[in-house]
Amino acid sequence: MLLFGLCLACACTKYETVLVTDNDPPVVNNVPAIKIENYVNRIFIDLLGREPLDEEMADETAALREADLSQEARAALIQKLQTSTAAVEGDTSYQHAYYRHLYNQAKVRCLEGVSDLTIEEEISAVTDSLKKLKLIALLHARSDLQNGAIDIGQFFARMVDNNIYDVINMNTFNFVNATFDNLYWRYPTDAEFNAGFKMVEYNSEETLFGQTGSSKDDYVQIVTGNAELYEGLIIWAYRQLLSREPATAETAALLSGFFTARDFPLVQQTIMVTDEYANF
């Protein structure tokens, strides 16, 4: 019995809980470290399509903590990933990776995620010179947008005005409906559909969104050159980044400046600096 008692006492002593002081994870403005790391991770994935490397995670979370998670510090990180041309391990640069990811996302939205290899094969296969030129323009859409040679509206014009998009959507009926769905997140009204269909199918002079056109090229320029395209891109950004539709007031706050400046990265930044996106 004595031996049993000694063993029991030793067992109890062996598994005593030891408290270590000053070992709590850092908290900034009531935001725990894990949430700050999750925010940095989410920014990298949404803008570059990849998670940050360990060194990137350490550097960027430290910078945010140092700035008390201010919106200015958040914006600085977002802008860095969108615009920095400094060499980065695994990427040519953050800017290159950003536009590559945006280009791939646009191809998923409009072209079923077609690969550049498939586009190159289609360029080699087509004999029509105009179709070939439009496919080449599609292949260069990423670099042209990155270099400022085209704006975001012209970028999406290339997404919907090429032979691959035509094959996916098969005929004018589907083409008109698809452009409205891909660009505006809605289908055309009867009047819009009739005007667009006649313009594309019959080269008939029609009026759409207050503009007159009489060819498929005119139609593409009209649907990618009006304010509703930019409203559709705001919807796209909210769906991607917050998994919800923007409220009317949120769209209105962004639309005028976006339509004028064509600055899609700024739309993303406006959403991504918020506490809702950061989950703070």
Image: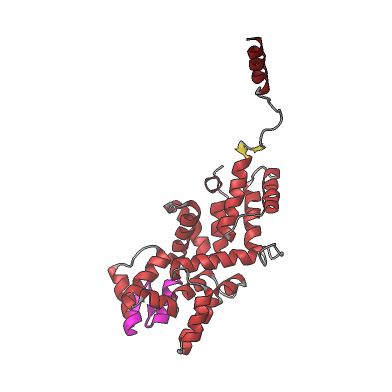
- Could you say where residue 99 lies in the image, as x and y percent from the top left? 58, 66
Q: Image point 49% across, 67% down: which residue?
A: 106
Horizontal side of residue 192 vs 44, given as left or right: left
Is 42 drawn above or below residue 203 in the view shown?
above
**Residue 11 position (above or below residue 39):** above
Q: Is residue 151 left or right of residue 79?
A: left
Total numbered labels: 0
Q: Position of residue 111 (x, y in %)?
A: 45, 71
Q: Is residue 278 left or right of residue 182?
A: right
Q: Residue at x 48, y 75 (%)?
A: 158
- Asked whether 87 or 274 is in front, the reply is 87
Q: Is residue 204 magenta?
A: yes
Image quadrant in which you'd find residue 43:
bottom right
Picture coordinates of residue 190, whole percent (x, y): 28, 69
Residue 168, quarter of the rendered image: bottom left
Of 274 and 130, nearer the camera is: 130
Whether residue 147 is visible here, answered yes or no, is: yes
* Viewport quadrant of the C terminus: top right
Residue span colored magenta: 199-226
- Please tell me whether residue 47 is drawn above or below residue 100 in the rendered image: above
Judge whether residue 276 is colored magenta: no
* Res. 198 image quadrant: bottom left
Looking at the image, which residue sits at the far top?
A: 2
